[in-house]
Amino acid sequence: MADAKSIEATLRGALGCTHVEVQGADGVHFEAVVVSPAFAGMSRVRRHQMVYAALGDRMREEIHALSMQALAPEEWTGR
C-alpha cells in the first residue's frame, strides 16, 4: 500500500518539483498537484506521462488511481 508522503518524495526527486501535494485516505486512490519547471511548454498528456513514468511500477503495484494537476511554475497560483 502506498502513502501520500512517499509518493510526494518520489515525484520531488524525479521531476525537480517546486510544489507537490498528494492526498489519499485509502492507500490506493490519490489526488495530486504537481508543479515542475520540467512541464513548461508540454501538453497535459505529456505531463501526465512524465508523472506516471516517475512513479514507475508503483502505478501498477501500489496505486490504483491517481487524479492529478500537473502544472509549470508560471501556471501555479498557490491554490
Image (cartoon, grey):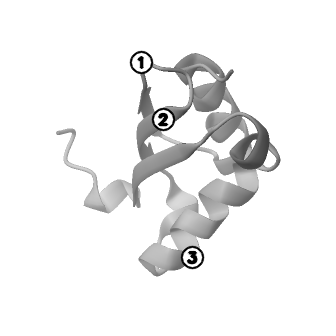
* Amino acid type, label 3: Arg
The answer to which quarter of the image holds residue 9 is: top right
Residue with the mark numbered 3: 46
Q: Nearer the viewer, residue 65 or 15?
A: 65
x and y percent of residue 25 in the render?
42, 18
Q: Is residue 18 above or below residue 47?
A: above
Residue with the mark numbered 2: 29
Q: Residues within 10 Å of mark 3 (few under 14, many from 20)?
A: few
Secondary structure state at the residue bearing disc 1: loop
The count of marks equals 3
* Amino acid type, label 1: Ala
| Outermost residue toward the right in this view | 57
For marks 2 and 3, give the CA distance.
21 Å
Q: Earlier in the sequence, mark 2 or mark 3?
A: 2
Q: Are marks 2 and 1 in contact (CB under 8 Å)?
A: yes
For marks 2 and 1, give the CA distance.
8 Å
- What residue is shown at x 28% (from left), y 61% (from top)? 75
Residue with the mark numbered 1: 25
For marks 1 and 3, give the CA distance.
27 Å
Q: Nearer the viewer, residue 73 or 14?
A: 14
x and y percent of residue 49 in the render?
62, 68
Q: Are marks 1 and 3 in contact (CB under 8 Å)?
A: no
Q: Is residue 65 above or below residue 7?
A: below
Q: Residues within 10 Å of mark 2 (few under 14, many from 20)?
A: some
x and y percent of residue 16 in the render?
63, 45
72 left or right of 13? left
Q: Earlier in the sequence, mark 1 or mark 3?
A: 1
31 left or right of 58? left
Camera-nearest label, 1 or 3: 1
The answer to which quarter of the image holds residue 2 is: top right
- What residue is shown at x 55% (from left), y 22% (from top)? 27
Q: Nearer the viewer, residue 32 or 64?
A: 64
